[in-house]
Image (tube, rainbow, N blue to C red):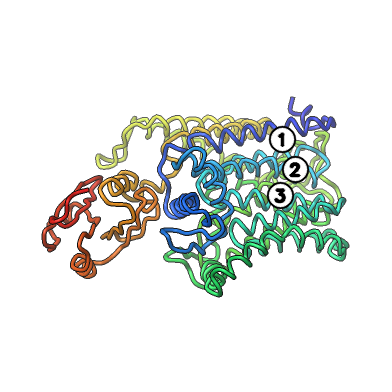
Amino acid sequence: MFNKIFTNKNPHIDLLIIASLLLAALLLFSTNLGTLPLRDWDEGIVAQVAREITRKNWNWVYPTINDTPYLNKPPLVHWSIAFVYNIAGVNELTARLFPALFTTFSVPLIYSIARELFRPRTPAIFSALVYLTLLPVVRHGRLAMLDGAVLCFFLLMIWCVLRSRRNLRYSLAIGLSFALLSLTKGIILGLLLGAIAFFFLLWDTPRLLRCKYFWGGILLGMLPVFLWYTAQFFHYGIEFFHANFFHQSLKRIWQPVGSHHGPIWYYLLEILEYTFPWQLFWFPGLYLSWKNRNLSWGKLVLVWSGIYLLAISLMNTKLPWYVLPIYPAFALAVGTYLTEIWHQFPVDLGYFRFPIYQYPHTQGESKKHPKGIPTIYHRLVVAIFALLALLTWVAWLYFSGIFHLGEENQTKPDLYLRLISITIALTMTIATILLNQQDRQFLPILIWGTYLSLLLFVNSPHWIWELQEDYPVKPVGEMIQKYTPPGQIIYSFDTKDRPSLNFYSDRLIKRVGPQKIQQQWQSHSQPYLLVQASNLNNLTLENLKVLKTVKGWALVTRESKIEI
């Protein structure tokens, strides 16, 4: 069946594959979006800005957050969320819906890019399936953040670049894609990602860069982003450029934001840590790209991976979602290498060696190659798969409560963790057996098992694991909203800012120290404080009244005022 799909030349097969990928992505990215609270930081900020857009007529052009100008990022994604708010109300599902849909459409786009690069259909299918089953793409693509839209618009731009080599009319779409990208996360990121397309064309199709119609179409398509930035400049003046260009973009190159810093190899470790099981095939895929660097796909993978990974690695600010735009190139490299495995098995898994002018075989013929490194690499991959299978079986026993690591580490049996761990264990066990037998059917097993594991994962309460790192803000925010008047500023003893708490309370929460609390208590006739319930006895404030206590946090005010 797989061979028929891979080799069938009927163009309608591509439409069927795109529709299937879209449905698979829609299921994975849209299920269970609304059951978990919003995460700090970006989700709380994006959702709050989108809500304020719905409240005032001109907020869609000049967005605000807590009634102050929001100069951080352009508002394209916020507009889409505000549109859903107006239809279906403000909640977690409506906040995450459009970002998840943007990420969903990026899956058929990576397939379309691969179809432009490869004549056979096989590497396009493998690349799309690898991309679909990458944990960082699934997790961050489902959140109310800007990165899913960045992936979608960047892949659209790359696809248009590839199409423009034969049809200059796509140059207008390149400009529009750049505009959408810049209106999502800023023109600095747009320029960085645009540089990848530029250097690819400089290497692959330099004649296109000398065509005035090509540049004319791009400039015409970029008109919306120029208009928006011009409107911001005339409204806010130089303050906008200082906040948007310098503080939120360029400054992050040499100065970390908060405690978000790390070594230069931070993102390389991020890729190797969270791209299970495909990281085992990434370096061979890059090697294969280098061996085929005279072909368009090899050039694109090398330029894309090299420029972007170098750029973000040199930045002092290190955030996990900054690496997301490299994952499509990761998927192309891995998908190409998986194609080699599919067509050349049974042979040893390794760095396949063939002339750089020859594209990977497409008819399934087996090609022998020198022994040595491939044999060692094959055995290493089998050993890693076997070890992972063993570890996941142990994890299943642990999450089932069959054993525990000491009395203090007893875990309550968790159905979701048991299902996820046994799915991964079965997948890795079967894949290990088939791989050891040099049976290429280990690839469909690995892909399907990874997809099913991710589907179970996103339906569990664990897919946003950061929520377990601090107190739950939703019940605390609902308490604040119920017991305080609209627009009231709440002063908090919390050790860090929680934008999601601002969203759920619909109030501005200001973090202050003990000394300033005394000042605020004396200067306001009706102050409201959010303090930990365990610290209530330590407060030396007059006429203190506790309005409500939720999840270890107490909302207090002055006794003389009537409770609202």
Pick whichever of labels 3 and 2 is earlier in the sequence: 2
Which of the numbered marks, if any, corresponds to residue 156? 3
Residue situated in front as seen by the camera: 49 or 246: 49
Q: Residues within 10 Å of mark 1 (few under 14, many from 20)?
A: many
- Relative horizontal placement of residue 21, taking residue 475 as reference (left or right): right
* Residue 203 appears in the rendering: no
What's the amino acid at mark 3? Leu
Q: Secondary structure at mark 1?
A: helix
Q: Position of residue 316 (x, y in %)?
A: 52, 68
Q: From what the image shows, is residue 462 above or below residue 299?
A: above
Q: What residue does disc 2 label?
A: 112
What's the amino acid at mark 2? Ser
Q: Position of residue 477 (x, y in %)?
A: 32, 48
Between the residue at mark 2 and the residue at mark 1, the CA separation in whole angstroms equals 8 Å
Q: Secondary structure at mark 2?
A: helix
Between the residue at mark 3 and the residue at mark 1, the CA separation in whole angstroms equals 15 Å
Q: Position of residue 249 (x, y in %)?
A: 56, 67
- Relative horizontal placement of residue 530, taking residue 291 as reference (left or right): left
Pick whichever of labels 3 and 1 is earlier in the sequence: 1
Q: Quadrant of the N terminus?
A: top right
Q: Are marks 2 and 1 in contact (CB under 8 Å)?
A: yes
Q: From what the image shows, is residue 499 above or below residue 82?
A: below
Q: What residue does disc 1 label?
A: 18
Q: Position of residue 214 (x, y in %)?
A: 83, 60
Residue lying at the far bottom in this picture: please name it: 238
Q: Secondary structure at mark 3?
A: helix
